[in-house]
Image: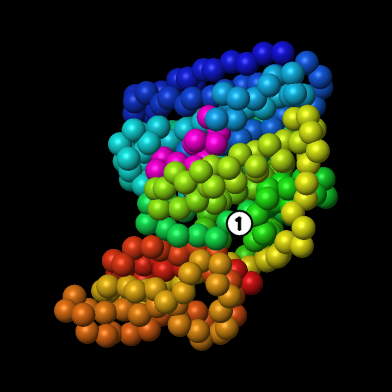
Amino acid sequence: MKKTEEILICTSADGKEIRIPVVRLEGDRPGPHAVITAGIHGCEYPPILAATEFARTVDLRAISGIVTIVTIATLPSFETRTPFVNPIDGKNPNRFFPGDENGTYTENLTWHLFHDIIEKGDYHIDLHCGDMTETLAGFCEFGTGYSDEVDRMSRDIALYSGVKNLVESNINSDEGDLPPGLNYVNSVKHGVAGAIFEIGQMGRTDREYVEAQLFCIRNVLRHFGNLDGEAVATPDPDWFTTYETVYSPAKGIFVRTVEAGDDLAAGDRIGEIYDYFGNYVTDVRCKKAARILYMTSSIAVDKDTFIADTVY
Ligand SMILES: [Zn+2]
């Protein structure tokens, strides 16, 4: 039985220090190796609060196998309160997995996260929430297409995560608007069952968000036998398979007329855009019947910038 807290220190290709805080829990009984990553986006606070609270409060006697927790994966973003990207090179870490040992700082960081930590796991939960200017409905997206066993484990992460909106992403499918370089998708591509879990939004630290993140951590660990206790599958979840991103048709002031979690019919209005004098410019509409998983909470939009991610 052992708990270690360590700042993993690596050096980027251009000589900068990369620090990754990692907690490792080892039980006396055998079990799988779970990897949990929080703080890939440094302004997404409920994942960081839940990961650190779990590490602080867990009873090691209840642990089997190994649980490795990266508490704040992108420290430069966290320390400088920079949403979405790593301020050192302006890159979004969740678009650069598996990274590049000889690339820029973010690519080096994701390379080390994957090769030094995530790749060693049997399954991987990547904890996120809506960033500073995003609102979202709780969801879990899981990767399939590697093998029956990995697919089943990925699906189970979602089913035991505690949220209702479950999205399957097949790594072999070109359908939908899933961006490249996603952390959990990369895990699945390398045979580590993986899912991204999202609940919380807009820089808030509401206890209900932290509790939902904690539920996901504990319930999934229980399901796979890493933590003592009974796991509970989400009853009657909603399953989705395809993403469609809605982009802004114009620059201006965006006023949303729907909320994350709403179900829309094809052509339904998501919001309206006004010019800088307050004159109506255009509607923003969705193309297909879909549920809004998350959307910008910002009123500032440029033409072709992100408005919402919908699933069906
Ligand atoms: Zn995120």
Residue position for label 1:
139
Find out whether residue 185 is within the magenta segment: no
Q: Nearer the viewer, residue 104 or 94?
A: 94
Location of residue 32 (image quadrant): top right
Quadrant of the rendering where the C terminus is positioned: bottom right
Q: Nearer the viewer, residue 63 or 22?
A: 63
Disc 1 residue type (three-letter): Phe
In the image, is 301 to the left or to the right of 179? left
Dominant secondary structure of the residues highlighted in magenta in the image? helix
In the image, is 12 to the left or to the right of 212? left
Q: Nearer the viewer, residue 98 or 253?
A: 253
Q: In this rendering, is residue 136 above or below 292?
A: above
Q: Residue at x 67, y 59 (%)?
A: 164
Quadrant of the rendering where the N terminus is positioned: top right
Find out whether residue 46 is within the magenta segment: yes
Location of residue 190 (image quadrant): top right
From the top left corner, tell me how far across and down residue 200 is, in percent: 50, 51
From the top left corner, tell me how far across and down residue 7 is, in percent: 47, 20
Magenta stretch bounds: 40-52
Q: Residue at x 26, y 74 (%)?
A: 252
Q: In this rendering, is residue 13 above or below 304?
A: above
Is residue 7 visible in this depiction of the protein?
yes
Q: Residue at x 48, y 69 (%)?
A: 259
In the image, is 167 to the left or to the right of 266? right
Q: Residue at x 58, y 71 (%)?
A: 291
